[in-house]
Image: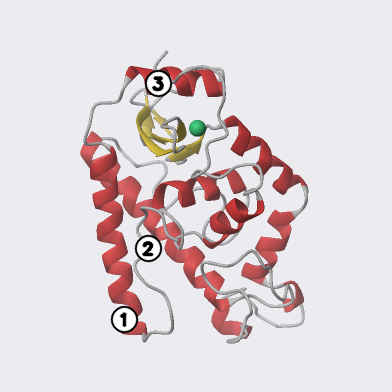
Amino acid sequence: MDTAGITDTGGSIAAEGQAGIFALRAKTAEKLCDSLLAGPLRQCDINEVERQLGRYPRGMVAVGARCVCGRPLVTVTRPLLDGKIPFPTTFYLTFPAAAKAISRVEASGKMAEFTALLQGEGSFGCSGSTGRSDDHGKPDGSLRSGGTGSTGNPGSPDPGIVQSYREAHKLYLIFRHHLAQKLGDSEGHISGISAGGMPERVKCLHALAAQSLVMGRGVNPFGDIVLDLIAGEFDPSVCRCSGHSIES
Ligand SMILES: [Zn+2]
């Protein structure tokens, strides 16, 4: 079911195996960056994104994900706009139908629900709780990484989700660091900052879904859930675009 992405495998594996898989994913994230930047940025893509946003996409260096018809869904934006403005949101969702559907998911209160999975709503009684999975996490949490759309038990943090969300944060930073090196951009003002509230909170579902669209399923658990929730309205593998040609 995975799209391109950087997902390797799933299932129950030893910590050493998980570290090895993460190292592999980190390398794959760098290769993904290389491949997205391999060709020149096409003027028709810039024009289409400008049409989607209603403004010129400053700092756009590549298209990170496309509809099956070729239309851009997510841009890759450089870490430093115009050589001076730090910009941490490397993966920027530009496709209007997706952005609109995700805004509705945000309005429905999902961000608080997701944050509760990271921090645990029932953690008030735990003295010195940090919301870390090893404080009071349930090993049998019902929502595993690469979730299915279920939101599980909201009373305690889900160790699988906490772990994969942290890794999604790290992979985001690894991609951007590689991008910054390729472009010669400084990350001085955004060091350690990814997007969407990662790794401790959930603050922007657009940013998380954008990561899922670029890096593929199985990287960002909440991005994956959001894409599942809006699949009736938006699906990168189902073109619902209409009207003008992208080449125009
Ligand atoms: Zn399309």
Q: Which of 165 and 213 is in front in this view?
A: 213
Q: In this view, does 19 lie above or below 107?
A: below
Q: Specify which label sits upstream in the sequence, 3 or 2.
A: 2
Single out the mark in the foreground, 2 or 1. 2
Q: In this view, does 63 lie to the left or right of 155?
A: left
What residue is at 35 percent from the left and 77 percent from the top? Answer: 18
Q: In this view, does 41 lie above or below 114?
A: above
Q: Name the residue under label 2.
A: 7
**What's the distance in space between the residues labelled 2 and 1, CA to CA?**
14 Å
Can see residue 194?
no
Q: In this view, does 202 lie above or below 22?
A: above
Q: Name the residue under label 1.
A: 17
- Specify few, some or many for label 2: CA neighbours under 10 Å numbering under 14, 14-19, or 20 or more: many
Could you say whether the residue bearing mark 1 is in a helix, strand or loop? helix
Residue type at numbered disc 2? Thr
Looking at the image, how many numbered discs can be counted on the residues?
3
What residue is at 34 percent from the left and 58 percent from the top? Answer: 6
- Specify few, some or many for label 3: CA neighbours under 10 Å numbering under 14, 14-19, or 20 or more: many
Q: Which of 150 and 141 is in front in this view?
A: 150
Q: Name the residue under label 3.
A: 46
Could you say whether the residue bearing mark 3 is in a helix, strand or loop? helix
What residue is at 71 percent from the left and 47 percent from the top? Answer: 106
**What's the distance in space between the residues labelled 3 and 2, CA to CA?**
29 Å
Residue type at numbered disc 1? Gly
